[in-house]
Amino acid sequence: MSPDSMPCGSVRSAAELNERIRALWLRTGGNLTDREREEYELLVVEWAEAVRCGVIEAA
């Protein structure tokens, strides 16, 4: 299945996920533990899916 034809499944908006990513970086000062890096990677994948699916909150 191509990435463009994959079903959209994110329930959080790109804006919310972006805020969580920024907060993680601020909280850790950019030095991520293995666990935090895993969290970051999951957030980025979910953010990309939200952007692809057009789930963006109005500012």
Image: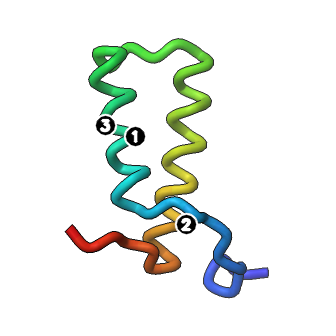
Check contact, mark 2 vs mark 3: CB within 8 A.
no
To which quarter of the image does residue 49 belong? bottom right
* Mark number displayed over residue 49: 2
Amino acid under disc 2: Glu
Q: What colour scheme was applied to this rendering of the protein? A: rainbow
Amino acid under disc 3: Arg
Check contact, mark 3 vs mark 1: CB within 8 A.
yes
Q: Is residue 14 above or below residue 30?
A: below
* Mark number displayed over residue 20: 1
Quarter of the image where the N terminus is located: bottom right
Answer few, some or many: residues within 10 Å of disc 2's Cα (few below 14, many 20 plus, some between 14 and 19): many
Residue at x-position 53% and y-position 22%: 36
* Helix, strand or loop for disc 2: helix
- In primary-sequence order, the first of circles 1 and 2 is 1
Residue at x-position 45% and y-position 74%: 55
Give left or right: position of 47 versus 46. left
* Residue 29 spot, x, y in % from top left: 29, 15
Q: CA distance from mark 2 to mark 3?
A: 17 Å
* Mark number displayed over residue 22: 3
Answer few, some or many: residues within 10 Å of disc 3's Cα (few below 14, many 20 plus, some between 14 and 19): few
* Residue 43 spot, x, y in % from top left: 52, 45
* Mark number displayed over residue 56: none
Q: CA distance from mark 1 to mark 2?
A: 15 Å
* Helix, strand or loop for disc 3: helix
Residue at x-position 41% and y-position 62%: 14
